[in-house]
């Protein structure tokens, strides 16, 4: 009986494991008005207005900000944990869910997108609002160690990089392009399919400069989620730095 109990326990433990999420990719099913690109971005085109959304993996974000992503626990990349890994692990957990939003306006006198009106909905009906600079500032404030010296400098580095690289709620005038990051909380392990909704895109305005014509678009993404004691080799190869 004792032997059977041990064998049963080992079988249960052998079936246990953690979840490891792969990078987001465009889903197979998309709205007819969008086009999937080779870099995993999705582009909506309205004549000569183009709006693109690209999911950013931690590896991509670390390569983009390599100078602040290679100091282990002292890395100051505000979007990832840099090349830090928990002790004894080969896998760095995600810090946020990040997209690059790019707007190219060669059609209208001006276009406006409010990044805080962008939402994310999962296939299992979870809803998330894009995080504001104030929310991200507060999040990183919790990592400010000591409130003086090096901790203060690291906090300032993180928040200044956020300020420069988040998508800004500004008019995009004719002939201009604008881009920046849109950030959501890290997704639960059971999320495999999701949509990002960009609502209230203002393309025409009345005499009081209030939107008189708007449009909404949705981008669909998916990812693989693996379960095991260690991440699969393909994810380790793409792990940050």
Image: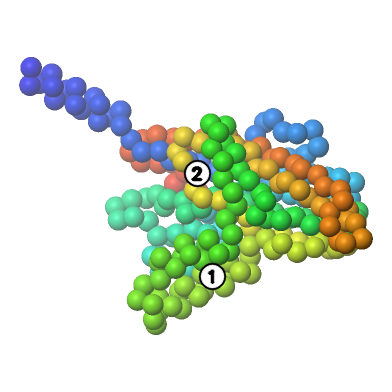
Residue 234 visible to the viewer? no
Relative image position of residue 241 (x, y in whole percent) = 48, 58
Density class for disc 1 (Cα within 10 Å; few <14, some 14-19, many ≥20) is many
Q: Can you say whether 32 is above or below 115 in the image?
A: above
Tell me what residue is drawn at x 87 percent, y 51 percent: 212
Q: Is residue 143 left or right of residue 40?
A: left
| Residue extending farthest bottom | 149
In the rendered structure, are the residues bearing label 1 and label 2 in contact, judged by CB atoms less than 8 Å apart?
no
- Residue 202, disc: none
Colouring used for the render: rainbow
Relative image position of residue 25 (x, y in whole percent) = 61, 40
Residue 181 visible to the viewer? yes
Q: Earlier in the sequence, mark 1 or mark 2?
A: 1
SS at badge 2: loop
Density class for disc 2 (Cα within 10 Å; few <14, some 14-19, many ≥20) is some
Instruction: Name the one closer to the observer, 226 or 44.
Output: 44
| Residue extending farthest left | 2
Relative image position of residue 142 (x, y in whole percent) = 41, 65
- Residue 159, disc: 1
SS at badge 1: helix
Q: Can you say whether 59 is above or below 153 in the image?
A: above
Which quadrant of the figure has residue 227? top left
| Residue extending farthest front | 208
Where is the N terminus found, in terms of image quarters? top left
Tell me what residue is drawn at x 51 percent, y 50 percent: 185
- Residue 187, disc: 2
How far apart, in angstroms, are the residues tagged by discs 1 and 2?
22 Å
Tell me what residue is drawn at x 45 percent, y 59 percent: 81
């Amino acid at each position: 009986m004792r032997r059977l109990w041990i064998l049963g326990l080992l079988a249960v433990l052998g079936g246990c494991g953690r979840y490891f999420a792969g990078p987001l990719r465009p889903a197979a099913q998309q709205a007819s008005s969008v086009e999937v690109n080779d870099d995993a971005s999705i582009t909506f085109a309205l004549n000569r207005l183009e709006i693109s959304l690209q999911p950013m993996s931690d590896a991509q974000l670390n390569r983009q900000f390599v100078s602040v992503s290679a100091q282990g626990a002292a890395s100051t990349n505000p979007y990832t944990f840099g090349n830090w890994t928990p002790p004894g692990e080969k896998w760095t957990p995600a810090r946020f869910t990040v997209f690059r939003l790019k707007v190219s306006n060669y059609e209208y006198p001006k276009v406006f997108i409010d990044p805080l009106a962008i939402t994310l909905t999962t296939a299992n009906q979870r809803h998330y609002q894009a995080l504001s600079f104030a929310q991200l500032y507060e999040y990183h404030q919790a990592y400010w160690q000591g409130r003086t010296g090096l901790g203060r400098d690291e906090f300032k580095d993180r928040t200044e990089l956020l300020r420069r690289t988040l998508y800004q709620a500004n008019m995009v005038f004719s002939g201009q392009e604008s881009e920046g990051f849109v950030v959501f909380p890290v997704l639960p392990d059971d999320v495999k399919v999701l949509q990002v909704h960009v609502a209230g895109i203002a393309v025409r305005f009345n005499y009081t400069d209030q939107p008189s014509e708007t449009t909404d678009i949705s981008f669909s993404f998916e990812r693989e989620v693996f379960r095991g004691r260690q991440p699969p080799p393909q994810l380790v190869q793409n792990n940050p730095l």
